[in-house]
Image (tube, helix red, strand yellow):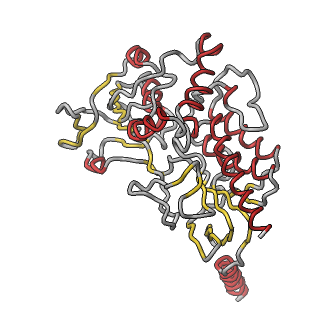
């Protein structure tokens, strides 16, 4: 009898806990909800705090910086540390070194702590909609109501893998670059790196240490100098990152407006890796993957590759299906001007590829976009209060 009472008591407690967890919670009202606590979200928070605008930052990860910690182990930033600090806090250490992804993650965590930014970790946003003149942000059982919502996330949210990938033989290990961490994940045998951009090139060189590697895709070009050499440290990197990427290739210049759609479709040039580096590592360049034949990858030139692994370095979708607002074009890209959404006076985007400049997704460029959006929000908040 005693054991039965104990079991019934435990079942009753579990039922009460479930009812409490599922009970609708009152809405949490705040002036601004910032979605994402990466470099874009923290930059927005920094500039909102300077202007005295109340806000909260929601992030699905357990810790600030986890979006960097979860990338492949050997990843280093493509920019020297002198370009890797956010507004108000330089990146520590030698300014000419290329930080690891874990150092970048720890820097972001320290940044949030230093400026006491109100980050709520472990909160995954499920839906953003509008109710009257306020935006509704649903996250699990929580409901946030805000006058302004900033989607501070990059355009790289959902892996892009071709439909024909499901036709590959089940004996071939497939993964997206977003899931690749280290060599030990791969099976013995050849590896096809599908995609010839920066991620594909860096992963290819690493994998070539232990596997035969084929890298498929069009040539995206490369920056005309080695970014870690002495000339780059003294002059060229500053010219490229600070001037060309940040000042010339923007939507405010004719050449920037011409280049932007090309980069959206083709991707940027190789920054650290060179064609000669790939050849020296033994990486074999092949045409793009066109489909599948007899369970094997089929190239555009008709060749079929007999490989044991395929790493899809084929980019990402924006992944904004949870935003239930009419702000997207036919390609599901937000229609916006410098981060301010068209037709939604309270919705903003920061961190998107070429949002305003080629530097918009880079650490040293996101601050300018964040400051602009924060200034627009502060102006609108002030105007409403005055009215």
Count of all numbered marks drawn on residues in the image: 0
User: Which one is in front, 194 or 266?
Assistant: 266
Q: Quadrant of the C terminus?
A: bottom right
Q: Single out the residue that lies furthest toward the top.
A: 230
Quadrant showing the N terminus = bottom right
In the displayed structure, 44 sits above or below 325; it is above
Give me the residue at 25% from left, 33% from top: 306
Residue 78 horizontal side relative to residue 278, left or right: right
Work out whether residue 210 or residue 303 is closer to the camera in this orientation and state it: 303
Q: Is residue 72 above or below residue 327?
A: above
Question: Residue 275 vs residue 120: left or right?
Answer: left
Q: Is residue 49 left or right of residue 253?
A: right
> Which residue is located at x 18 percent, y 42 percent?
293
Q: Left of 117 or right of it: where is 312?
A: left
Which residue is located at x 71 percent, y 81 percent? 13
x then y, percent, for residue 34: 67, 57
Q: Residue at x 70, y 80 (%)?
A: 20
Tell me the quarter of the picture where residue 384 sits.
bottom right
To which quarter of the image does residue 303 belong?
top left
Is residue 105 or residue 272 the one in the foreground?
272
Q: How far across and down, in percent of the image, does residue 238 sit?
A: 63, 21
- Across and down, in percent, residue 346 comes to 63, 63
Decide which of 5, 334 is in the foreground and name it. Answer: 334
**Residue 72 at what x, y percent from top left?**
54, 36
């Amino acid at each position: 009898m005693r054991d039965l009472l104990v079991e019934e008591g435990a079942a009753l407690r579990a039922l009460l806990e479930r009812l409490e967890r599922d009970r609708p919670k009152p809405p949490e009202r705040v002036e601004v909800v910032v979605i994402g606590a990466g470099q874009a979200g923290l930059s927005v928070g920094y500039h909102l705090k300077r202007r005295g605008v109340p806000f909260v930052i929601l992030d699905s990860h357990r810790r600030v910086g986890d979006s960097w910690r979860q990338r492949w182990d050997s990843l280093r930033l493509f920019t020297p540390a002198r370009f890797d600090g956010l507004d108000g806090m330089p990146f520590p250490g030698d300014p000419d070194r290329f930080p690891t992804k874990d150092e970048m993650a720890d820097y972001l965590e320290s940044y949030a702590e230093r400026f006491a930014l109100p980050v709520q970790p472990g909160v995954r946003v499920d839906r953003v909609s509008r109710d009257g003149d306020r935006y509704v942000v649903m996250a699990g059982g929580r409901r946030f109501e805000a006058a302004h919502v900033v989607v501070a996330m990059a355009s790289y949210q959902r892996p892009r893998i071709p439909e024909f990938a499901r036709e590959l033989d089940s004996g071939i290990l497939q993964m997206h670059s977003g899931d690749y961490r280290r060599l030990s994940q791969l099976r013995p045998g050849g590896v096809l790196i599908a995609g010839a951009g920066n991620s594909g090139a860096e992963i290819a060189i690493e994998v070539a240490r232990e596997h035969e590697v084929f890298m498929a895709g069009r040539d995206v070009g490369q920056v005309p100098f080695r970014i870690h050499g002495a000339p780059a440290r003294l002059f060229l990197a500053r010219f490229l990152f600070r001037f060309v990427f940040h000042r010339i290739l923007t939507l405010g210049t004719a050449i920037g407006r011409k280049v932007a759609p090309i980069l959206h479709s083709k991707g940027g040039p190789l920054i650290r890796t060179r064609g000669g580096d790939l050849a020296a590592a033994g990486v074999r360049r092949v045409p793009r993957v066109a489909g599948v034949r007899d369970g094997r990858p089929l190239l555009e030139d008709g060749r079929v590759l007999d490989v044991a692994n395929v790493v899809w370095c084929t980019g990402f979708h924006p992944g904004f299906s949870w935003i239930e607002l009419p702000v997207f074009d036919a390609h599901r890209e937000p229609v916006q001007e410098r981060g301010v959404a068209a037709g939604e006076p309270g919705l903003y985007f920061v961190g998107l590829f070429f949002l305003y400049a080629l530097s918009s997704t880079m650490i040293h460029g996101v601050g300018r976009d964040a400051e602009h959006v924060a200034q627009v929000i502060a102006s609108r908040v002030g105007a409403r209060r005055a009215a």
